[in-house]
Image (cartoon, rainbow, N blue to C red):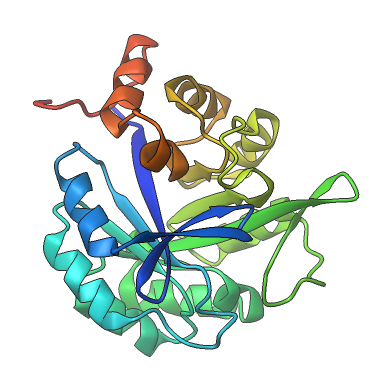
């Protein structure tokens, strides 16, 4: 039986945890290692760590930070930020990451996804897709290349064909807003996805997690709900279980 996941997201800029709204308005929340320790006590299914400035600043995520977090992280860890080569991925996996998230590097060179899968296996390759609305239509978005014009469905289909083992869909317009998930878009993209799809953006409470899964997501990722409300991942999973959605509960 497939158990649906609730995954906290930790956004960083080098060494500090960030609270963002639509990836722009920012607030420093402190040390990512402390955050990882907190999630160890909360029955978290996985943890996603993303350095959202690495690609724009033409650098890789800090390996010392990754190693320190991995040493404190007793759940699967996905890490992304500035990855552009097989060597970059190898360093992250050696530092303790279980999976890597490819974003701008894959957009620039889609064959990078195929090469990464060939070397490391699909099970640890996640393609992350940032989506924003432009003229009322969803498009793939990049801070590095704002002029990028790509249909998310086209990129989802291609990323899968290249071998991606999982997709992380970030709805940037809802990032940090806690205004609810985009059920319609999640449903449309999930229908095109033959691999697990993680929906991220806008989650305001346990009922949004239920809505995202019912729309077709395999997992729900969120940040603000766990930083700025009393809701925990367990609260979300208990609500999902109440609605008949299979999840991993404490002791289960």
Residue 202 falls in which quadrant of the image?
A: top right
Q: Is residue 93 visible?
A: no
Q: Where is residue 32 in the image (x, y as percent from the top left)?
A: 29, 62
Q: In this view, does 61 lie above or below 135?
A: below
Q: Where is residue 166 in the image (x, y as percent from the top left)?
A: 45, 53
Q: Is residue 82 visible?
A: yes
Q: Residue at x 20, y 75 (%)?
A: 67
Q: In this view, does 102 lie above or below 9?
A: below
Q: Relative to 71, is 99 on the left or the right?
A: right
Work out which quarter of the rendered image holds the N terminus and state it: top left
Q: Residue at x 53, y 74 (%)?
A: 53
Q: Where is residue 30 in the image (x, y as percent from the top left)?
A: 33, 62
Q: Relative to 30, is 72 on the left or the right?
A: left
Q: Which residue is drawn at 64% across and 29% down?
A: 183
Q: Relative to 155, is 96 on the left or the right?
A: left
Residue 177 falls in which quadrant of the image?
A: top right
Q: Relative to 221, is 141 on the left or the right?
A: right
Which residue of the protein is positioned furthest toward the left in this rendering? 251
* 23 or 100: nearer the viewer: 23
Q: Position of residue 114 (x, y in %)?
A: 50, 74
Q: How many marks?
A: 0
Work out which quarter of the rendered image holds the C terminus and state it: top left
């Amino acid at each position: 039986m497939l158990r649906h996941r609730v995954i906290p997201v930790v956004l960083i800029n080098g060494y500090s945890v960030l609270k963002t709204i639509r990836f722009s308005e920012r607030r420093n929340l402190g040390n990512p290692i402390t955050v990882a320790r907190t999630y160890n006590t909360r029955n978290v299914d996985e943890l996603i760590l993303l350095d959202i400035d690495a690609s724009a600043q033409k650098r890789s995520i800090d390996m010392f930070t990754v190693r320190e977090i991995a040493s404190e992280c007793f759940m699967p860890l996905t890490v992304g930020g500035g990855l552009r080569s097989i060597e970059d991925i190898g360093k992250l996996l050696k530092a303790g990451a279980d999976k890597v998230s490819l974003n701008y590097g894959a957009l620039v060179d889609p064959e990078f996804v195929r090469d990464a899968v060939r070397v490391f296996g699909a099970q640890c390759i996640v393609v992350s897709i940032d989506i924003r609305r432009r003229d009322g239509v969803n498009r793939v978005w990049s801070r590095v290349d704002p002029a990028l014009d790509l249909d998310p469905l086209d990129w989802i289909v291609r990323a899968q064909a290249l071998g991606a083992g999982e997709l992380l869909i970030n709805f940037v317009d809802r990032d940090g807003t806690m205004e609810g998930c985009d059920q319609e878009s999640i449903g449309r993209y999930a229908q095109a996805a033959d691999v697990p799809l993680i929906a991220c953006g806008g989650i305001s409470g346990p009922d949004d997690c239920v809505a995202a899964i019912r729309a077709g997501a395999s997992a729900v990722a969120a940040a603000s709900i766990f930083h700025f409300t009393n809701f925990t991942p367990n609260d979300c999973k208990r609500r999902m279980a109440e609605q008949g959605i299979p999840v991993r509960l404490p002791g289960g």
